[in-house]
Image (tube, rainbow, N blue to C red):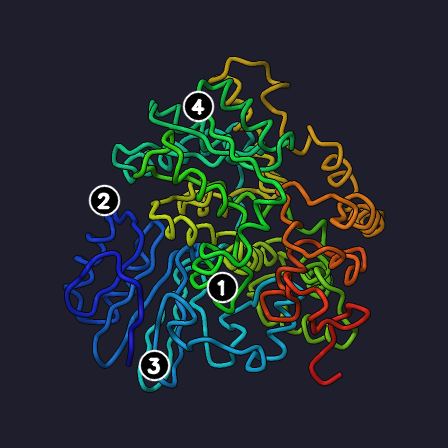
Amino acid sequence: MNVRLRREREGSGGTFARGHAFVDGEYLDTAALEDRLEGMTSEADFHSFASSLYGYFSLVLDLEEQICAAVDHCRSRPLFYTTDPVRIGDTSQAVVGAVDPSEYDPVSEREFLTASYVTGSETLHPDLEQLEAGTSVTLSESGATVRSYSEYYPAPQQYTKRDALEALDEVMDDVSQRVIEAADGSQICVSLSGGHDSRLMLCSLLKQGYDDVIALTFGREGDVDPVMAQEIASNLGVECVFVEYGSNTWTDLYGSDLWNEYYDRAFNLDSIPGLQVLPALEAVAADPRVEDDAFFVSGQTIGGVGSHLPPTPSSRDELIDYIYDEHYSIWPSSATLSSLLKERISNRLPNRSTNWTSEYAHWEQRERQSKYLYQDGIAYDLFGYDFWYPMADRQLVEFFETLPEEYRRDKSLIEAYSSALYGSLADIDSEDASRSDSEWSITRKVRNTVKNSPLRPYAQVLYRTYLQNPDRGDTGPLAMYALLADGQYSMHSTGNETNHSFRAAEAVGRLDFSDPDSHRMPTDSIIRAPFE
């Protein structure tokens, strides 16, 4: 049995920890987590301890005959393992080494191409498994035993709007106090956009009286997110660092030492690496306004699940179709592959009830959110910054499980509370306080108007073919399409593709951004089943 993890400090014996957490109100940094592990002699003690933690961490305990491991409820610091031989690590390369695309599991590779991640505990490598969010595992020569200690599955209770807002206020006070205690007097850097989640994070810290706060925003000059973020910060009296993104941001990054080092850590045969924050972190690492020991808070949010809830599915099959249409569409699929992928979706659903929006919420949080959206932690770790996701704090997640659907859908409760708190702290009227990025951008207004209408697929094709087309000069709000070589978008696009489509194809070796003529994509760009 073999444990292969990067160490934040030298622990004794077979204990390994990354990150930090709270247990029974007590804050445990990495060293304290390892100290707690060092006294454990049984898997029962380990799994009980892991399930009691509220924070962002990964843990491994080597008991010689067994290896116990756990990740937090968001999988912010992932772990990977094999059972033959028994081996565990915090990168895929540490466990199975470099993997040639010819070794990929063919169905998982196609899921990756169409969704940008592999669902369940599987990865692109047929023998490599990932610990899913909120789970722990015991590895031994006889195999793996996985336990789930935290799953997001809404079971709504009765709330009036006023009661829900008051309860959210209390939860956010607790969340903010945890952030402040974890920061331990350091400057807190809030990653700020034009949306309500990051705005609420900033306002909640200010409400608690923490004044060593700075905001960070990034994107193209004049884009709605950085423009709104700078206005929000100004209204609140908080300094805001703006990192401008342009085509050179990505052309300089691609293939650089930073790119390669990040991909070595972040591309783990599970999903495309999250790139959005990486250039900003490189910039602020050299910016004296952001202190070397700054504590970062980022806007990943449990509220995001509510932004994608299906309208009103009346059956399991309708729900599966919705998930497929919503999340498996970055490249088109053949009918045969579609059937295979829908079967995989069906196998991932918890199947606990006929509350289809709760079934969906469980799938979205455990798959899309934890496999892709919470990956920024790897970038923060790379630059040596500690981080917390306040809007995905486990207490907040558990509170959201109790909310009626109407308060979760489209972040309605978050937006109402955020607007009221922001308006009060900034002393602005309710109309100005409630505006968000989706209301200031014409494109986003149209998108929100048609997202649940029959016009959506047609509007999407028109937008991506004629407006957001890098071969026509538009590189997207973060300029990320600049990664593509000239003509590469038009060569493969069917009108539905995003930058995720091309990045997924590049990650599995089907495209090369530096050599557009060297590719393994079908001429019609339709992804087919392995045996077709």
Examine the rendered structure and indicate whether residue 345 appears above or below residue 192: below
Residues packed near mark 1 inside 10 Å, few (<14), some (14 to 19) or many (20 plus) = some
What amino acid does circle 3 point to?
Answer: Val
Q: Distance between the residues labelled 4 and 2?
A: 31 Å
In the picture of the structure, the residue carrying the numbered disc 4 is 239
Judged from the image, the secondary structure of the residue bearing numbered disc 1 is: loop
Q: Earlier in the sequence, mark 4 or mark 1?
A: 4
Query: As drawn, is 278 to the left or to the right of 502?
Result: left
In contact (CB < 8 Å): disc 4 and disc 3:
no
What amino acid does circle 1 point to?
Answer: Phe
What percent of the width, then of the height, locates residue 336?
A: 76, 77
Q: Which of marks 2 and 3 is nearer the N terminus?
A: 2
Please state which of the two labelled residues, at mark 4 or mark 3, is closer to the viewer: 4
Query: As drawn, is 268 to the left or to the right of 147?
Result: right
Q: Residue 345: which quarter of the image?
A: bottom right
Examine the rendered structure and indicate whether residue 178 appears above or below residue 323: above
Residues packed near mark 3 inside 10 Å, few (<14), some (14 to 19) or many (20 plus) = some
Q: Residue 294: which quarter of the image?
A: top left
Residues packed near mark 4 inside 10 Å, few (<14), some (14 to 19) or many (20 plus) = some
What amino acid does circle 4 point to?
Answer: Glu
Q: How far apart are marks 4 and 1 (CA)?
A: 34 Å
Please state which of the two labelled residues, at mark 1 or mark 2, is closer to the viewer: 1
Please state which of the two labelled residues, at mark 3 or mark 1, is closer to the viewer: 1
